[in-house]
Structure formats: structure tokens, C-alpha cells
Amino acid sequence: MSRRDYYDVLGVSRDADDSALKKAYRKIALDSHPDRNPGNKEAEDRFKEASEAYAILSDSEKRRAYDRFGFAGVGAGGPGAGPDFGDLGNFTDVFNDLFGDLFGQRGAGRRRGRGQRGADLRYNLEIDLTDALNGLESKLRIPKMRPCKVCEGSGQKPGTSPESCSRCRGTGQLMFQQGFFRISRPCDECGGAGEIVRHRCSECRGAGRTEASQTISVTIPPGIEEGQRLRLAGEGEAGIAGGPPGDLYVVVSIRPHPLFERDGMDLHCEVPVPFVQAALGAEIEVPTLEGKVTLRVPEGTQSGTVMRLRGKGLPALRSSARGDQLVRIFVEVPTRITDRQRELLEQFAAESGHEVSPQHKSFLDKLRDLFG
Ligand SMILES: [Zn+2]
Ligand SMILES: [Zn+2]
């Protein structure tokens, strides 16, 4: 594997000073940082390459060794021979140590003028089953942080600008000599930002955002299911000091319905039918999510029979397909009868004689098989 010269990687001359190195690395690292190029292998490689080059060249001892002996001088002779740069985490550390948190992962609130992403928000929205059928346009009132109107999120008093930090000369880092090592740490004067806001916005006291509640309208599509979430990009909390806003997640739950149970796109319900109607056949009224429909129950319908109402279920998400409603018949026997009704039923029994119904017969057959 051929390797590019560290100076070429950073695009600097061999006599580049520390600040030129840093500037060159910073530009490459910002462009190719994995957080800005998710899934882009080429950018990741470029980031690694530049980070390795910078790690060597920014260390005066290693740089001297590299200048004299090349890759061999810094123990980076080839794949696997170099210092442990295989793990991208190391680079992210190098990067963060140098430039602090540009991507909102660490050092919350410390960085000024570079911004931190706002928090994601979650909103639990309870809807009715009919809303899952028809869809719903809902207005959500959400308490959240918004960019300060006065300073437009910068945290600075309008008309003023931040001063470059004199302690670290705008680099945000302080260098120390400790034994053989040169160590850098974030400047404590400016918190590592390299600049200091002397005149803070009085509205937000420098935070760049204020508390507010906001009404957002959200469209719930027909066919939405329990627990599904909708992402509203950029509708979360405002970023800190000019950072991008977070996202809003609307998590949908569906209120239990007194009549219907949902099974994917299908709906189940149970309808009681008086035993005489079940025996004689009848037209009964059945509820659906869109009102009542008439269902023909054939003569001799048994309890537990399931009848299908096609297309009366719920729609699929983003499709015109629709499920069915499954009606389970529950044959009801009267709990109280008049003397006259009793007489008639006794007549009915006498008329039936020893005639056995099909289900009863199959039950008796099974009993005989089991007990002889
Ligand atoms: Zn402000
Ligand atoms: Zn400073």
C-alpha cells in the first residue's frame, strides 16, 4: 500500500508552522468529519488520513523524526505497523481535543458561535380508532426552546461582536510542557471557543434561545398503528448558540374502542343475536367505524360463527388497500321467559323429539370415542 506524504495529505509545505498545519487540518477535518458524512467511506478515510498526518506533524519530536526517516521514523511503516489509528474513535478524540465539540456530542453549552444541536422532543399523541381510519390533522402545543428573537440565536447583544480570546490567541487551546510531553487543553478563559462574548444578549442572557410554546400541526396518515412515530425534522428544540434544531417525534397511541379490536388492517367485533333469529335467519344491524350496516344472518347460524364484511376494516399506510371487519356471532339465550314462552318452548322440544343437532352429534361421537 502506497502512502501519501503527510505534508501532501494536509496540503502544506514542509516548513509550514503550527498554525498553518492546524488550519489545513481543520479544513479537511471539518469537511470530511464522519458526523457530517454518514456512511461515506471515502470521507472517513480522508478524515483518518488527515488526522494521522496532523497527529504526527503537530508533535515536534515526531515531526523531526518523520522529516529525517519518513514513515519508518514514526513507526508508521505500513499497514498495521503504525500507531494505533485503526479506531476512528481515536481520531474523533484528537479532533475534539483540538477543536472541541463542533457536533453537539460533548461539552454542552461551552462552545459559543459554533453551535450545538437542540434536543429531540417526544410528543405522545392519543387518537381514536376512527382517526386511524380517516387520518387526522392535529394541532400540538409544544413547550420548547426557540431561537432568541433579539439576538437571532447568537447570544450576543445586537450590534456587538465577540472578541478573540487574548489568553489563547483565538485558538481555544492552551499548550503546556509537562515533562517530555506537550499537552493542550481547552482555554479556561473562553471555554475553548477562541472567542469571548463580552456583551451578552439581555433577552436570553447569552444562551441564544428562550423558552416558548409553539403550536405545530401534524398530519396523521390513515392506517397509522399503535406505537408508530412520526418524525418532524427540525421541529425539536432550538440549537444552542446558532446550532441546528433537534427533531420532534410524535408517538401515536390509539384509545381502546368499546366495540372493535384491531388486528393489523382487520377489525374484530362480537354481535349478540337472539337464538330465535339465529335459528330462523334474520337481518341484523352491525356497527362499523362508518356507521351501521345490515348483515344477513342465515338460518341455523351457530354461536361463534364469524362473518366477514369486506373492506370495512382499516386502510394500509400509504395504500388504498383496506382490511375487513370480522363479525363474530354470539347466540344469546333469553335469561327470563314468560309462562307462555315456556309453554311454546316445551312444545318446540316435544316437536323436536330426539332429533340431535349436527354439533351436538359430533360432540356425542367424541365422548363415545373417549369413554366407550
Ligand atoms: Zn438573545
Ligand atoms: Zn481562550
Image: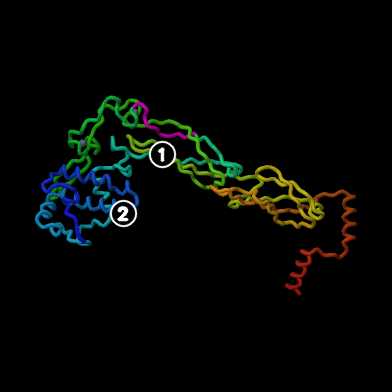
Corner quadrant of residue 350? bottom right
Residue 349 falls within the magenta-colored stretch:
no
Circle 1: element type: loop
Residue at position x 90%, y 57% in the image: 347
The amino acid beneath tag 2 is Lys
Tell me where residue 6 appears, x and y as whole percent.
17, 52
Tell me where residue 335 appears, x and y as whole percent.
80, 50
Residue ID for mark 1: 234
Q: Residue furthest left?
A: 68
Q: Quadrant of the N terminus?
A: bottom left
Query: How many discs mark residues in the rendered view?
Result: 2
Residue neighbourhood size for the residue with mark 2, other residues' Cα within 10 Å, grouped as few (<14), some (14–19), many (≥20)? few
Residue ID for mark 2: 41
Corner quadrant of residue 116? top left
Is 346 on the left-hand or right-hand side of 242? right
Q: Quadrant of the C terminus?
A: bottom right
Comparing 168 with 298, the one in front is 298
Q: Main SS type for the magenta part?
A: strand
Is 242 on the left-hand or right-hand side of 162? right
Please state the extent of the stretch shown in magenta in the rendering: 141-150
Residue at position x 57%, y 41% in the image: 135
Tell me where residue 148 appears, x and y as whole percent.
36, 29
Residue at position x 23%, y 35% in the image: 190
Q: Earlier in the sequence, mark 2 or mark 1?
A: 2
Q: Nearer the viewer, mark 2 or mark 1?
A: 2
